[in-house]
Image (cartoon, rainbow, N blue to C red):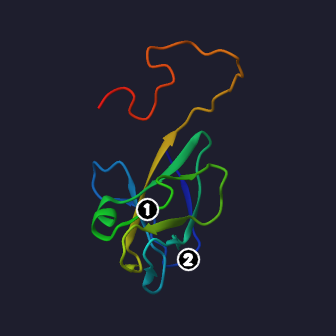
C-alpha cells in the first residue's frame, strides 16, 4: 500500500516504524519549541504533513505506550480517525491525564498510526431483533 504524503513544513518528519515488526508508524511533533500541556488540558500538536490515503482505508491514530505511561499524555479521544478524503494537516490532540504540567519537545514521537480497511454498513430499521441468551444485559452482565 502506498500513501502519498506532502510536507507542509520543512521540519516535518515522515512517520516511520520503530522496528521491523512494529504495526504502527511513529508520528512526530512538528514544533520549533517545547509545548507545555497543563494538567487535564488537551493541545493539538501539528505534524507538518498532509496525506492522500487510498479509498477504502482509514488511518487510526493511537497513543504511544511510552508517552502514556511516562508522561500521562494520550490521544484525547482514545483513537483518532483520519478519513481518506481528508487533505489537511494532521494534528494530534494530546491530553495530559496527570496533575502536573507535561511537555512535548520538537520532533518528539507523540503518537502512532495504523492503517486498516473498513466496512461501511447499511443500516436496516426494524421493529424486532433476534433474541440471544444475553439479551439486553450490558456493562458486566456476562460475568465477573
Task: Establish if 59 lies above or below 10.
Answer: above
In front of the other: 124 or 4: 124
User: Residue at image x 38%, y 52%?
Assistant: 24
The image quarter in which residue 140 lies:
top left
Q: Residues within 10 Å of mark 2 (few under 14, many from 20)?
A: some
**Residue position marked by numbered label 1 in the rendering:** 15
Residue 32 visible (yes or no):
yes
Left or right for 85, reference 108: right
User: Residue at image x 28%, y 63%?
Assistant: 69
Task: Check disc 1 and report its element: helix, strand or loop.
Answer: loop
Q: Position of residue 49 (x, y in %)?
A: 55, 67
Locate the C terminus and report the quarter of the image it occupies.
top left
Residue 104 visible (yes or no):
no
Task: Check disc 2 and report its element: helix, strand or loop.
Answer: loop
Q: Position of residue 99 (x, y in %)?
A: 37, 74
Q: Residues within 10 Å of mark 1 (few under 14, many from 20)?
A: some
Task: Establish if 115 lies above or below 70.
Answer: above
The image quarter in which residue 96 lies:
bottom left
Task: Please report whichever mark, 2 or 1, sits nearer to the chain's N-terminal start.
Answer: 2
**Residue position marked by numbered label 2 in the rendering:** 9
Q: Position of residue 116 (x, y in %)?
A: 49, 41
Gap in angstroms between the C-alphas marked 2 and 1: 14 Å
Left or right for 65, reference 56: left
Left or right for 122, reference 81: right
In front of the other: 100 or 15: 100
In front of the other: 105 or 79: 79
User: Residue at image x 48%, y 14%?
Assistant: 132
Q: Position of residue 21 (x, y in %)?
A: 28, 48
User: Residue at image x 62%, y 42%?
Assistant: 55
Amino acid at each position: 500500500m502506498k500513501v502519498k504524503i506532502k510536507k507542509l513544513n520543512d521540519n516535518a518528519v515522515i512517520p516511520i516504524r520503530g522496528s521491523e515488526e512494529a504495526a504502527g508508524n511513529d508520528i512526530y511533533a512538528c514544533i520549533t519549541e517545547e509545548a507545555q500541556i497543563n494538567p487535564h488540558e488537551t493541545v493539538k500538536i501539528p505534524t507538518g504533513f498532509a496525506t492522500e490515503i487510498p479509498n477504502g482505508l482509514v488511518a487510526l491514530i493511537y497513543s504511544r505506550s511510552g508517552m502514556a505511561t511516562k508522561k500521562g499524555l494520550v490521544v484525547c479521544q482514545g483513537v483518532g480517525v483520519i478519513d481518506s478524503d481528508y487533505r489537511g494537516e494532521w494534528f494530534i490532540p494530546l491530553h495530559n491525564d496527570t496533575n502536573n504540567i507535561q511537555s512535548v519537545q520538537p520532533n518528539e514521537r507523540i503518537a502512532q498510526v495504523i492503517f486498516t480497511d473498513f466496512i461501511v454498513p447499511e443500516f436496516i430499521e426494524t421493529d424486532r431483533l433476534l433474541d440471544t441468551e444475553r439479551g439486553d444485559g450490558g456493562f458486566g452482565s456476562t460475568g465477573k
